[in-house]
Amino acid sequence: MAKVTQFTRPAVRIRIDLNARDVHGYVPARLSRANGLMAIGDTVVAFEPDDEVRAPAEVMKIVGDFAYLDVRWNELEDDVVAPVIRTIHQTDRTGQQTGSLSSMIRFKLAMPAIAGAAALAAIAGPGLVQTSPATPHAVEAKDVHLS
Amino acid sequence: MADVPVGELVIVRFSPFAAARLGESAQDDYDRALVEGTPPFFGISTYGLVRSDSSTTVDSLIERICKEAPCGGKNVCVVTKTSLEAAGFAVQLSEPPKLHYDVILGSELRKQDTERLEELLESGRRRNPAWQK
């Protein structure tokens, strides 16, 4: 079965005057005010920076240096930068860090001991037995003499 | 802005309002007319409706323009034809599209004209009552 890979790219943005129209009701906008190339039939983002609004628009025709856009006025919305969402780890009353970060720190501290013991066991083969560890993550190995 | 008398043509414009952007839009329209082979002039696109009776509010006129033109934006500047003409700007109906008017700057684009128009527009700036996002 052929592997299908889908790519997405942000739509081209073009600055418009919210009042400008041609006789068909399309919004003319200079191609030089777009941040990329466009062709007839493309859906672009028409925006007005002073009012901080945007709307999807279809490129209906291109004549000279102008694109003529069919703006979906009923989809006009805020054009503000989306806030960056960050996970904040808080500490509880005992000073313990809560959240997934503390789990990650514990895992990273234990990992070398676990990996080291596993490697040792793999080298020694079946002649090694493990004793009860003194600490949760400590591992000991002793030789066993087989008769 | 001051109260709008009955029978007055209410002119509204959405963003941009800054003089530099008004000049840019006027130049765009002029250049586009040359490309399309129509007589070029410097003008600013606006929309308008007559306040037909005392029960019609300015807000209801703006909402009707937004719906019928259609057009929109968060902010809108509201002026009257009388105030524009008093400031030296002719107002000309230029349909289609519906309710579209040009505020004429003339055959020459001058910075003082766009600055005067910006000042007049800003005096009637308000939140668009039709903006519900």
Image (cartoon, coloured by chain):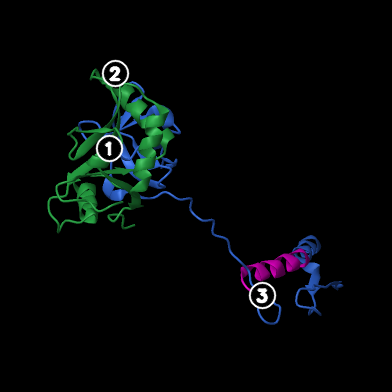
Q: Which residues are magenta?
A: A98-113
**Residue A116 in sight here:** yes
Splitting the image into 4 quarters, where does residue B15 fall?
A: top left
Q: Are marks 3 and 2 on the same chain?
A: no
Secondary element at tag 2: helix
> Which of the two marks, 2 or 1, is nearer to us in this view?
1
Q: Is residue A141 left or right of residue A93?
A: right
> Which of the two marks, 1 or 3, is nearer to us in this view?
1
Residue A87 or residue A136, whichever sits in front: A87
What subunit carries mark 3? A
From the top left corner, tell me how far across and down residue B10 is, in percent. Answer: 22, 45
From the top left corner, tell me how far across and down residue A141 is, in percent. Answer: 83, 71
Q: Is residue B9 left or right of residue A28?
A: left
Please tell me the numbered disc located at residue B86: 1
Return the residue at label 2.
B34
Compared to residue B37, the image places residue A73 above or below, namely below
From the top left corner, tell me how far across and down residue B87 is, in percent. Answer: 31, 36
Residue B26 or residue B107, whichever sits in front: B107
Return the residue at label 3.
A91
Q: Residue at x 31, y 55 (%)?
A: B131
Residue B86 or residue B110, whichever sits in front: B86
Residue A2 or residue A94, whichever sits in front: A94
What is the letter of the green chain?
A: B
Q: Check if residue A70 falls in the magenta segment.
A: no
> What's under tag 3, amino acid-wise?
Thr
From the top left corner, tell me how far across and down residue A68 is, in percent. Answer: 29, 31
**Residue B16 in sight here:** no
> What's under tag 2, amino acid-wise?
Leu
Q: CA distance from mark 3 to mark 2?
A: 68 Å
What subunit carries mark 2? B
